[in-house]
Amino acid sequence: MADGTESESRKLLRRLREEMASEAAGQERLDRITHLIADSMASEVCSIYLFRDSETLELCATEGLAPESVHKTRMRMGEGLVGRVAMYSKVINTPDAPSAKGFRYMPETGEERYSSFLGIPIQRLGEKLGVLVVQSREAREFSADEVYALEVVAMVLAEMAELGAFVGEGAALSPLHQQSVVLTGGPAQEGSAEGHVWLHEPRVVVTNPIAEDPHTELERLSEAVEELRVGVDKMLEMSQDGDKEQLQVLEAYRMFANSRGWMRRMEEDISRGLSAEAAVEKEQSQARARMSQVSDPYLRERLADLDDLSNRLLRILTGQGNNIGAELPPDPILVARNIGPGDLLEYGRALKGIVLEEGSVGSHATIVARALAIPLVVHTGRITTEALNGDHILVDGDQGVVHLRPEDTVVGAFRDKMAMQAKAQERYASIRETLTETRDGHRINLVMNAGLMADLPSLESSGAEGVGLFRTELQFLIRNQMPKRQELVAQYARVLDAAKGKRVVFRTLDIGSDKVLPYMKHVAEPNPALGWRAIRVGLDKRGVMRMQLQALIRAANGRPLTIMFPFVAQAEEFHAARFEVDKTIAREKRLGHALPETLDVGAMLETPSLAFAPQKFFDEVGFISVGGNDLKQFFFAADRENELVRRRYDTLNVSFLTFIERIVERCGISGTPLSFCGEDAGRPVEALCLAAMGMRTLSMRPASVGPVKSLLLRSDLGEIRKIISDARHRGEQSVRPAVMEWLRNQT
Ligand code: PEP
Ligand code: MG
């Protein structure tokens, strides 16, 4: 390949294939490969560096460098030229290595004699495996053709590594997918689970990276691409009257599927000796590497489209990659890069846990996982490349930690923790039917938050006395199109049936801000949280509001009905919405539909402004529920979605509790029923302080009812109130230390 011709390149690949088929053990095979490459590149040195762990590269085989340095020379990711190739997934090609940026001298290797350096990342679908290096004495830059040829070789090495070709006696690599791995991500739904990996999209295994006959491979590629194009065209046809964004994605798919550049690169890979699937994977790997470098969201999206398309093409070529027909393993833990809410609902409660490589705390999949109470960890990175179907896995949704193929000691400790949690659950179950009354005789009403049918069974199992917040937007968010009125009627009726007479507070559509309907025209706003959302959208789009009100009235069908409007910032908004309710009632009456037996219409207090509304508002509104998640973000001016600030201010901050007290007082004057339905209501210590400030109804996640009740039953609100007021007089910022101290002394 010194002359860089295609046939030379194919010759090298053929020799590599013979190597793959040989009986040699891992180390011997690696040694022979470095020899082969150096020989065919006519360069003095060829070395293979592989990752020992995610941070450390080790020289595993070399032709030309000091043999004693093999398995001794190590560098960290980013260290020296080799470390930089790995870190940035980028080729380094320099005629004068010692002067290149980042060079680090490794004396034990004897590399000082070599001037030129070419380093190529060995990677497979975004998984960094190592670095392939050639060096020579002569100060020259390697030609584009040589670089390209070596990239093809690196691709084959990656495939060989994946197939376990370097594992064995004296092996350089420990077998892939066998070591334990600990991944840390973000906790998105609490709880712990032990089970077996179920890959939502199992990895495609390419068993034949090298192909003898480029003509056959070119034909296979062109047939597969044709099938892909037809498929994309069909999808486009079917969604012509669908939503715009989906169309845009499909158009982008079509553009790539017809892209000459993409095709040309893959054809060239094949003519160098790669099989069709290895060629697809090589381009996909490079696109993934680019994806991790670019920050422009548009470009990232397009690279993600290309990635998706490559997956489809690989599936066509290999016939692999769908779980069709395969059985879920026992205690399945779903592992995916990302998953849509619809797909997740299809798995439903069969899953014991979920781990998403990407995902986010506010994503729709997270909303569904929460509704189903399935422990979920998001943002773990690289799990889909590490895990294999059936692998043993532990998911800690409280800490956001995942143990893949864990060691026995870890399993033991994890099971102990799960047993303790199960014991606590038993304790909570034993007080399920007990009414919540504090030691000093205050009756607290514990209700639950819900949003999907899947939540309703929790009404019984948690012991909640009703549904204090039913987030109706979830039904809208998990679909691809606006639900029809009749569908909503059926859904709401089922919710009421399942509640068996317990009160359900239906909150009208709360969209906007972080909750974007995929099928509604998206308006770009500078500050969505302060923008066109919730009741503001409802009042501007009366048709949707009316449709929902009608569906609620028809679903109630003569039963009591409770409706709540979100994000009311001033009394006038509530009046306008209430007026729509009355109009809809009158219309339904005219149409001969049964009217609700009782109708209670309330408002969510989520902006500080409403706490200062005229007394008349408090007299008129049916009830008020404090949406603490939003209220807190506006009270402290700290975005609830922004990791940098969202935990910065304590709910038990004296100012916030004083504000809550003020709301309690105002509602007290008019006798307006008051509840609190933000996440804080489900945190025992916070719940205790809210109750001490006078909140008598708390609405929370079902799993929180037990822990909150257990603490309230043991507490004296009068004492807590005194502790809070003492802390306030001492001028403390938060009452938390004082309350925690008191609680510690109780046990
Ligand atoms: C809140 O803001 O506290 C609330 C309950 O509403 P959501 O979390 O749905 O915005
Ligand atoms: Mg809110």
Image: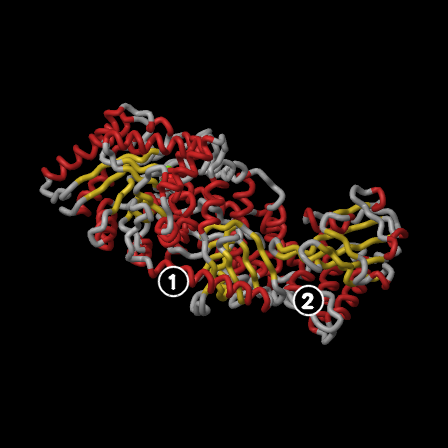
Q: Nearer the viewer, residue 284 or 230?
A: 284
Residue at the far top: name it: 614
- Mark 1 lies on a secondary structure that is helix
Q: Position of residue 689 (x, y in %)?
A: 40, 41
Figure disc tally: 2
Q: Is residue 481 visible from the viewing direction of this image? A: no
Counting residues from the N terminus, which is met first, the one under dot 2 or under dot 1?
2
- Mark 2 lies on a secondary structure that is loop
Q: Is residue 575 visible from the viewing direction of this image? A: yes
- 320 lies above or below 118: below
Q: Nearer the viewer, residue 533 or 505?
A: 505
Q: Which mark is residue 221?
A: none
- 464 lies above or below 71: above
Amino acid type for the residue under numbered disc 1: Glu
Q: CA distance from mark 2 to mark 1?
A: 43 Å
Instruction: Name the quadrant containing residue 457.
Output: bottom left
Q: Report which residue position mark 2 lands on.
A: 174
Residue at the far right: name it: 113
Q: Residue at x 31, y 44 (%)?
A: 469
Q: Position of residue 343 (x, y in %)?
A: 40, 55
Instruction: Name the quadrant containing residue 74.
Output: bottom right
Q: Is residue 171 left or right of residue 672?
A: right
Q: Report which residue position mark 1 lands on.
A: 426
- The quarter of the picture where the N terminus appears is bottom right
